Image (cartoon, rainbow, N blue to C red):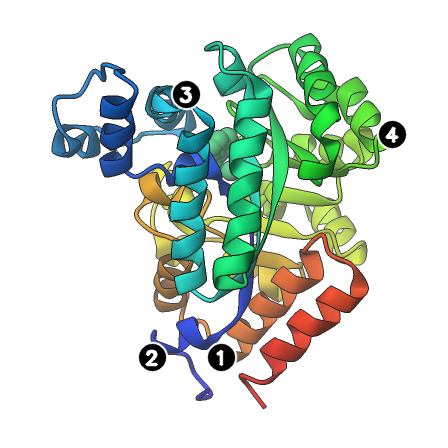
Amino acid sequence: MKSTTQNIQNIRDIPKAELHMHIEGSLEPELIFTLAMRNNVTLPYASVEALRAAYAFTNLQSFLDIYYAGASVLLKEQDFYDMAMAYLERAHFDNVIHTEMFFDPQTHTERGVAIDVVINGLHRACVDAKQKWGINAVLILCFLRHLSEESAIETLQAALPYRDKFIGVGLDSSEVGHPPEKFARVFAMSKAAGLRLVAHAGEEGPPAYIWQALDVLGVERIDHGVRCLEDEKLVARLAKDRIPLTVCPLSNLKLRVTPDLRQHPLKKMLDAGLCATINSDDPAYFGGYMNTNWEATFAALNLTATDAVTLARNSFEAAFVDEVTRAGYLARLATCYD
Ligand code: ADE
Ligand code: ZN
């Protein structure tokens, strides 16, 4: 690799982990229409083009409304499998060798889809993708924070019989007005079940939500977390404890968390010594998968090959894997810059 990564083709050479993507956010308009036809679901859009034209978001909520509508076509185990296989093939193409995929069971159980249909379909895709492409894929169950903690607890209890098929829990959906502390009990229960803990915080919400995610929920990673830069003490804490932040640049641009990618906080986060990573969040909605996020961010912020290695290394440091697997990933990374 050259000393500066102006040549965007190099991004593909770098093995990397993706730690923040919502599998329902990988549903491309074409697949939404295919599944709608297969399942006799009527969509409020006349065509793929009309649906894509609706992807003009002004904030997180304006996106979530369309994202939940898109997920309404998922009914059968095969639908969840097909969605996940499409993403995993795409991730493999981007040299993502490890991915931790979020899924939102309540989006489906609220429509009468049984949780085993969701988990079994996604998990079968993880197994088949490993066999087909060698990619390591695991699942993290997210609670929807606009719903009650009781609903989250019911969801956890319904999922626990499939405990071997997901590795952790997270917290997503509408952030502002739904602070992490609302979910203290369900995160304690999840921890007791041996699950890994993450939460979205500091995407649109204030730094106080990041503090709460750390100190009330006890999370091991923060999803987004870009607003941490508003609080010096918080930055010091995140740096000292090496708490990873799973940053999603194109998502931040499309949801207007940042007005322009050239003003994106990622570089400042790296300069502050934070364990920041690049991820795609909802790639079908925000204009790109993993490498498109890397390429756009490198171009906008003039990042270097050294930054590329740091970001890939951070992604492996932050991955929920055993130390032997982590050492294997880091060794694979080392072969591309030695
Ligand atoms: N669900 C899917 N994408 C999300 C995001 N960026 N923030 C919160 N919840 C989400
Ligand atoms: Zn997200």
Among numbered discs 4 and 1, the one appearing first in the sequence: 4
Q: Which residue is mark 4?
A: 192
Q: Local crowd at mark 4 within 10 Å, few (<14), some, or many (≥20)? A: few
Query: SS of the residue at dot 1?
Result: helix
Q: Which residue is mark 2?
A: 7
Q: Are marks 4 and 1 in contact (CB under 8 Å)?
A: no
- Does 309 appear above or below 115? below
Q: Which residue is mark 1?
A: 305
Q: Are marks 3 and 2 in contact (CB under 8 Å)?
A: no
Q: Is residue 149 left or right of residue 134?
A: right
Q: Amino acid at mark 4?
A: Ala
Q: Rounded to the nearest whole Å, what is the CA distance between mark 1 and mark 2?
A: 10 Å
Residue in view at x 39 percent, y 39 percent:
82
Residue 239 position within the rendered picture, expressed as x and y whole percent measured from the top left: 74, 57
Q: Amino acid at mark 2?
A: Asn
- Does 113 appear above or below 25? above
Q: Nearer the viewer, mark 3 or mark 4?
A: 3
Q: Rounded to the nearest whole Å, what is the CA distance between mark 4 and mark 1?
A: 41 Å
Query: SS of the residue at dot 4?
Result: helix
